[in-house]
Amino acid sequence: MVEISDKLRPISRKDVNLFEVFAADSGAFRRTLFTYVDTNERAWAGEAHKIRKHDLTDGDIRANLRKIPDHDTFPEVTQDITPLPPHSDATELFFKRPQIHCLLEEFGGSIVPQMLLEEAQVMEFLARHPHPNIVRYHGCVVRRGRITGLALTRYQKILDHLFHDDAFGLDFDRFERQCRDAINHIHSLGLAHNDLNPSNIALHSNNDPVILDWGSCKDFGELLLSAGTPGWIEDEFDVSRKEHDLFALDKIMAWMREEKAKCTKLWGELSIETT
C-alpha cells in the first residue's frame, strides 16, 4: 500500500497531522501516526512506535514518511462534483482531507476514498439546500482525476475551545435556537448528522454556531461507515437516525451550561482573592 519515500521537501512537526494509537484492551500507548498532503496534492503517511507525539522529532517524521498511491487515498471524481474554482483564496479556506491515518490502522483503509466521496456528495446536496448555520462548501480540490480534498470556509473559533476564551460572550439561548434550526433543516431533508459534538461546531465572528464535519451524515436508516464520538452519544450505533442529533445537542447544551457555571465560580473565587 505504501511506497518507498521519494523526493519530498523538508518538513517538520508543524506540517503534519498527528494521531496517537492506544491498545484497546489495556489503554497503553502504542504508536504515533502522522500524515501529510504535499503541494502536488499527494498523500504521505508514517508511524513511529513507542514515541509520543510530543516527543516526535523532525528527523523521526522524515525518516518514516512514505508516499501513498492515489488509488488508496483519493476517490475518482464523479460528474456530480463541483471543482474548486481556480484562483480561490486558500487562506480563507479549510481543506478537509481523507482519513489518511486509517490506512495505517489494523482494520485497514479500504473505505478511506469512499468516505471522502460520500462526504463530498453530501456537501454538494447541502449546497443546493443551504442554511446559514451549516459550513459553506466551495467545491473539491481535483488533481489527476481524483478528489484530494473538500474546500470549506475556515473558522477561527471552535466550540470545544470556547470556554478557554469567551464563555461569557455567548448568548446560549440564541446559540441553541440556531443549532436546532440547522438540525431541523437537515432532518426535513431526510438527513441526520450523526456526529454532533463541541469539536464539530465552529463560531462565526458574531458567535453564531456553524455545524462542521459532515462525514457521518446520511439519509435516515442508512448504514454508517463511521458514527458518533464517545462521550456525546447515548449508545453505540451504526444506522443514521435523527434521534442521535437530538440527544447530542441536548448533551452539548448541558455541557455548555455546566462549563459556564464552572467559569463563573472560578471568576468569583478569583475576585474574592484579589479584594
Image: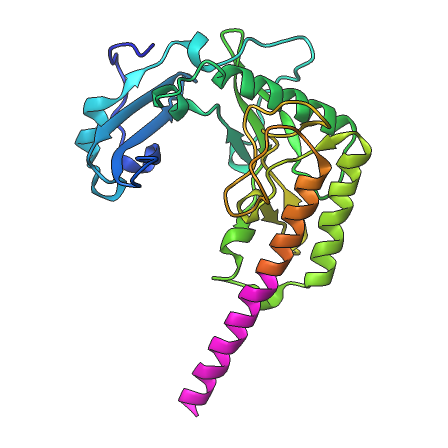
Q: Which residues are magenta?
A: 256-275
Q: Is residue 106 visible?
A: yes
Q: Position of residue 239 (x, y in %)?
A: 64, 28
Q: Quadrant of the N terminus?
A: top left
Residue lying at the far right in this picture: please name it: 188
Horizontal side of residue 18 vs 191, given as left or right: left
Q: Position of residue 241 (x, y in %)?
A: 70, 34
The answer to which image quadrant residue 254 occupies is bottom right
* Front one among 22 and 102: 22
* Front one among 81 and 9: 81
Horizontal side of residue 22 vs 121, given as left or right: left
Q: In the image, what residue occupies the spot 73% across and 62% down?
A: 173
Residue 115 lies, with reference to residue 56, above or below; the image says: above
Colouring scheme, one of rainbow, by chain, secondary structure, one colour:
rainbow
Q: Position of residue 230 (x, y in %)?
A: 50, 43
Q: Is residue 84 visible?
A: no
Q: In the image, what residue occupies the spot 45% across and 83% down?
A: 269
Q: Position of residue 114 (x, y in %)?
A: 55, 15
Asked if residue 192 is among those painted magenta in the image, a careful observer would answer no
Asked if residue 273 is among those painted magenta in the image, a careful observer would answer yes
Magenta-colored segment: predominant secondary structure: helix
Residue 16 lies, with reference to residue 76, above or below; the image says: below
Q: Quadrant of the C terminus?
A: bottom left
The answer to which image quadrant residue 84 occupies is top right
* Front one among 241 and 5: 241
Residue 117 lies, with reference to residue 168, above or below; the image says: above
Residue 15 lies, with reference to residue 179, above or below; the image says: above
